[in-house]
Amino acid sequence: MAPPVSKRIKTLSVSRPIIYGNTAKKMGSVKPPNAPAEHTHLWTIFVRGPQNEDVSYFIKKVVFKLHDTYPNPVRSIEAPPFELTETGWGEFDINIKVYFVDEANEKVLNFYHRLRLHPYANTTPNTSNGSEQNTPGRNANDVEVSSIYFDEIVFNEPNEEFFKILMSRPGNVLPSNKTESCVYSKQLEQEEIDRIDIGIEKVDREIHELKQKLESLIKQEAINGN
């Protein structure tokens, strides 16, 4: 007889932050064994906790679907760390499927990540958000490229058994400040919010100025019409 299904907890949501993405670096003359001659970069794609925490208490496995030119392009990683290292020369979209532990009884999380191998021209990577910053005088081939993103997995109305599992860990809380082991932090989150607020104020100010100009033009036309 199948075990009884655990009841779901109504009106409750539990979130768990993760980071995902890839790092890449151009290879020199020494290449890994069996690396094709045309491959120029060594890269690693991953799904992990924001501070490299073990997330296997709620994630069962991660499946990465690579470009079809790779041998066995579907790679299943069934134990932490949930990451895959390969070599290559081109950028492409990698399909990522996150499978949760059996107790969760949740659907597979399915999304894509664009593999980044090359920095933009005359830039070096900023690993805080996957974007890149200008740093004059540095050779782009000498730097490690990072394309890393932060997200939260939200479990709506988890069942009772899975809820206990989620509550058994602190929840992978973001640190207050940026550290070498965690590229995302509450400080960076607040800085991004501040930038958005400044942008909104600028747009509101420009809208107000344009409205005043428009009202002035309408008045002037009305005067000229009389």
Image (tube, grey):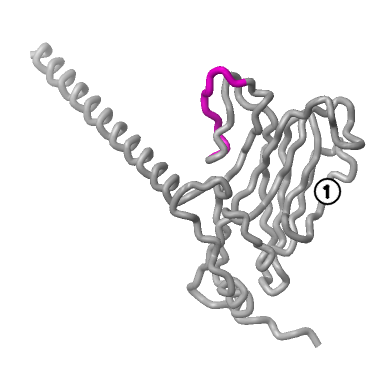
Q: Position of residue 5 (x, y in %)?
A: 68, 81
Residue at horizontal 84 percent and vertical 29 percent from the top: 30
Q: Quadrant of residue 122?
A: top right
Instruction: From the viewer's perspective, tell me whether residue 118 is left or right of residue 17.
Output: right
Q: Nearer the viewer, residue 145 or 211?
A: 145
Residue at horizontal 65 percent and vertical 62 percent from the top: 55
State the residue lying farthest toward the right. 34
Q: Position of residue 71 (x, y in %)?
A: 90, 41
Magenta stretch in the rendered image = 129-138
Residue at horizontal 35 percent and vertical 42 percent from the top: 194
Q: Is residue 188 magenta?
A: no
Q: On the rendered image, what quadrant is the N terminus found in?
A: bottom right
Residue 139 in the image: above or below residue 145: above
- Please tell me whether mark 1 sits on a helix, a strand or a loop: strand
Residue 38 in the image: above or below residue 72: above
- Reading the image, the residue beneath label 1 is 74
Residue 166 in the image: above or below residue 134: below
Q: On the rendered image, what quadrant is the C terminus found in?
A: top left
Q: Position of residue 31 (x, y in %)?
A: 85, 32
Instruction: From the viewer's perspective, tell me whether residue 15 is left or right of residue 63.
Output: left
Q: Quadrant of residue 88?
A: top right
Say what amino acid the circle numbered 1 marks.
Val
Q: Nearer the viewer, residue 158 or 142?
A: 142
Residue at horizontal 86 percent and vertical 38 percent from the top: 70
Q: Is residue 137 magenta?
A: yes
> How many numbered marks does the figure carry?
1
Crowdedness near tag 1: few (<14), some (14–19) or many (≥20) residues, C-alpha within 10 Å? some
Q: Position of residue 68 (x, y in %)?
A: 84, 38
Query: Of helix, strand and loop, which mostly describes the magenta segment?
Result: loop
State the residue lying farthest toward the bottom. 1
State the residue lying farthest toward the top. 224
